[in-house]
Amino acid sequence: DGYTLTVSPASFLTTNKSIFKTLPYDPEADFQPISRLVNQPMVLVVKDKQKYPTLAALLAAAKAAPGKLTYASSGDGSPQHLAGLMFETRTQARLLHVPYKGGALAINDTLAGTVDAMFAVMPEAVPHVQSGKLHALGVMSPTRSPVFPQVPTMAEGGVADLNLSAWMALLAPAKTPRPIIDQLNRAVQVAFDPEMRAKLAESGIEVATSTPEEVKRLITQDIKIHADLVKAAGLVPQ
């Protein structure tokens, strides 16, 4: 009826289908998308700027010692983990994934130097890169981030086709009447006014509102992309 909604991260709608044997919901059939809300590009960060001044330096180190260079994530199948899998697939380098129980623990150990690197969601990384505690090597987006204009894209750093965003979407239960969906979609457009957009941009969050149909296509597309990454990594559904 339009009064019960959910704001969902991409992983619940895409990655979970590949990493779990069964789900209590069908991401494509049980929801009616209203709009995508935001994109949160991934950024590769390191603690040791002297050892890894550039993406090329990190990649060379990874290839020189396969499976030795470590990267943190907030858990198996998380956006940080998928970014690492995508990096390995595109570069043929082999890294050691260190999953944590949450993004805060992962970023804390990256700050401490316990792990070598992290493919962080932009809001996780922004304050630490701005303070100089972490060094950003590349953003996983087609264009540079307005927050980090000095940081190259992965393509500029020498690794093409390496784009990943931890997007979020607003959804209703399946079979919610279309007029209600359209009304909510219009409300989303109004909610993201210039002031809200500017505030989110400070944290590296990009407003990315869309039509319901665009969200449907995105879910279907990312389910396949993420399934291919999980399969290539040899992960067994739990």
Image (spheres, grey):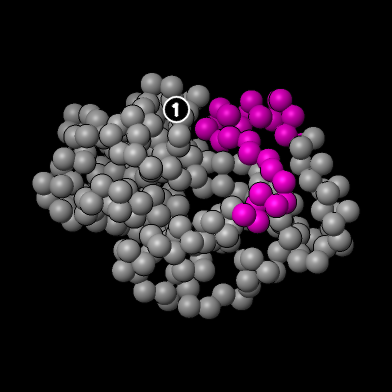
| Residue located 65% across and 56% down the image | 216
Residue beneath label 1, please?
A: 144
Looking at the rendering, which quadrant does residue 186 occupy?
A: top right
Q: Is residue 52 above or below residue 79?
A: above
x and y, in percent, of residue 120 in the image: 41, 43
The answer to whether residue 111 is seen in the rendering is no
Q: Decide if residue 144 is on the left or right side of residue 93.
A: right
Quadrant the N terminus occupies: bottom right
Looking at the rendering, which quadrant does residue 4 occupy?
A: bottom right
Q: Is residue 216 found inside the magenta-colored segment of the image?
A: yes
Looking at the rendering, which quadrant does residue 228 occupy?
A: bottom left
x and y, in percent, of residue 36 in the image: 66, 47
x and y, in percent, of residue 22 in the image: 53, 78
Find the magenta span and give its range.
191-217
Q: Decide if residue 7 is on the left or right side of residue 89.
A: right
Q: Decide if residue 194 is on the left or right side of residue 230.
A: right
Mark 1, Cα crowd under 10 Å, few <14 / some 14-19 / many 20+, is: some
| Residue located 30% across and 53% down the image | 89
x and y, in percent, of residue 85 in the image: 34, 55
Q: Is residue 155 found inside the magenta-colored segment of the image?
A: no
| Residue located 36% across and 67% down the image | 231
Q: Is residue 198 above or below residue 190?
A: above
Numbered label tally: 1
**Viewer-proximal residue among 4 and 131:** 4
Label 1 sits on a secondary structure element that is loop
**Viewer-proximal residue among 200 and 156:** 156
Quadrant the C terminus occupies: bottom left
> In the orientation shown, which residue stands out farthest toward the left?
64
Residue type, numbered disc 1:
Arg
**Viewer-proximal residue among 57 and 110:** 57
| Residue located 71% across and 64% down the image | 31
